Image: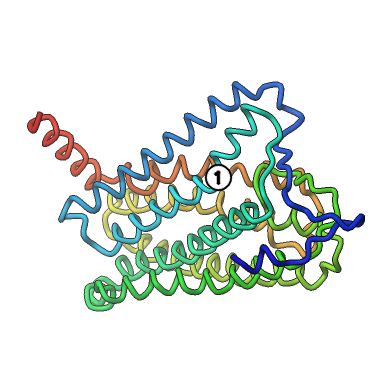
Amino acid sequence: MMLWKEMPMEMGNGTTVQEFTLEGFPAIQHLGKVLFLVHLLAYLASITGNAVIVTIICADSRLQTPMYFFLSIFSFFECCFISAVIPKLLVIFLLGRQTISFLACFIQAFVFLYLGAAGFLLIAVMSVDRYMAICKPLHYPTIMNLKTCFLLVTACFTLAFTLITSLVVKVSQLSFCGPHVIPHFFCDLGALIHLSCSDTRSVEMLVFVLALLILLTSLIITVIAYSNIVVTIVRLPSAKERQKAFSTCSSHLIVLSMIYGSCVFIYVKPKQMNKLDSNREAALVNTVVTPLLNPVIYTLRNKQVHQALRETMCRMKVSR
C-alpha cells in the first residue's frame, strides 16, 4: 500500500495526480434517480440472496458437503465482489460524476480483480467437484474430503492473490499525465492503462496473458468437466433422471456463459484501450446481473436448500 503513495504520478506541468473522476454513464445520467433505485434493489436482492445461501449452508448439517461448501464460498465471494463496485455506482447515479483518490482507486481495482480471478478459479473447482460426484461416485467421498476442499479453496485464494497483486502493482507504477477522467463506473485497469502517459505495451500484454491464463484455463476445465457430465447423464437409464440432470446443468451453463462471455469480451484482447464504452455495459452483466441470478440458479432451485430454508423459517416462527 505504501508503494502506491510513493509512485511517480507526475502530470505534464509537474503537479501530482491526487485523484481520478469516475465518469459513469453520462448518456443516461438524466435517468440517474430511476437507475439508482433499480440498481439499489438489484444490489440488495443479490446481497440478501447470497447471504441467505451462506447462512443456510452453515446452519444445516445436511448441507455440509463439498458441493455446498464451495457454493457458500462462492456466494460469499459474490457479496464481496459486488460490494466493491456497486455502492460507488449508486452514488454516481444519484449525484453524477464522482471523484476517487489515487490509492482508493487502485485498492478498488485490486479487490475487484482479485475476487473476480479467485471466483473463476473457484468455478473451475466447483465444476471438477460436480464431475467427480456424477462421473466418479465411488471415488468421490474419498477424494473430495474436507482437507481437499480447504486446500483447493486456499489454492484459489493464493494463486489469484499472487497474479493480481503483481498486475495491479505494475499498473500503479505507471505515470498518469492527465486527463484523469476514467470512462467507467469503477476503477477498471483497462481504463487506467488508457489514461497513462507511459509506454503501456508491456502492461497490456501482461493483462492479456493473465486474462488468458485465468479465464481460458478455468473455462477449459469447466467445459471438459461438463462435457463428461453430459456424456454420463446421457447414459442414465431413467428419462426422469436425465431430464432432472440436464435441467440443473443447463441453468448452471447459462450463468457460466454470461460470466465468461462478458469477461472474455473485456479482458482477452491485446489492446485494452479499445471499446472502453462497450466495456461498461459488459461489466454491468458481471457486477449486477449474474450476482442476482446466481442464488436462484445455483441453489435456490435446489430441493435440499428449499427444505432447509423452510425448516429454518419455521424454527424462527416457533422461537417468536
Going by the numbered disc 1, the residue's amino acid type is: Thr
Work out whether residue 76 or residue 133 is closer to the camera in this orientation and state it.
76
Q: Quadrant of residue 300?
A: top left
Residue at left 48%, top 53%? 253
- Residue found at x 84% / y 55%: 15
Residue 4 in the image: above or below residue 76: below
Residue at 38 percent across and 41 percent down: it is 296
**Residue 86, quarter of picture:** top right
Residue under the image location 32 percent in, 71 percent down: 150
In terms of depth relative to the viewer, which is nearer, 97 or 63? 97
Q: Is 280 rendered above or below residue 192?
A: above
The image shows residue 312 at horizontal and vertical percentages of: 17, 39
Residue 208 appearing in the image: no
Q: Residue furthest left?
A: 318
**Residue 112 showing in the rendered view:** yes
Q: Position of residue 44 (x, y in %)?
A: 43, 34
**Of residues 203 and 68, which is closer to you in this image?**
203
Q: Residue under circle 1?
A: 287
Q: Position of residue 310 (x, y in %)?
A: 18, 36
Left or right, 303 with reference to 116? left
- Locate residue 56 relative to residue 262 in the image: left or right: left
Horizontally, residue 155 falls left or right of residue 9, namely left
For the C terminus, give its image quadrant. Answer: top left
- In this rendering, the answer to whether 20 lies above or below 25 is below
User: Which is more toward the observer, 296 or 233?
Assistant: 296
Give SS at disc 1: helix
Instruction: Point out the image quarter for the N terminus.
Output: bottom right
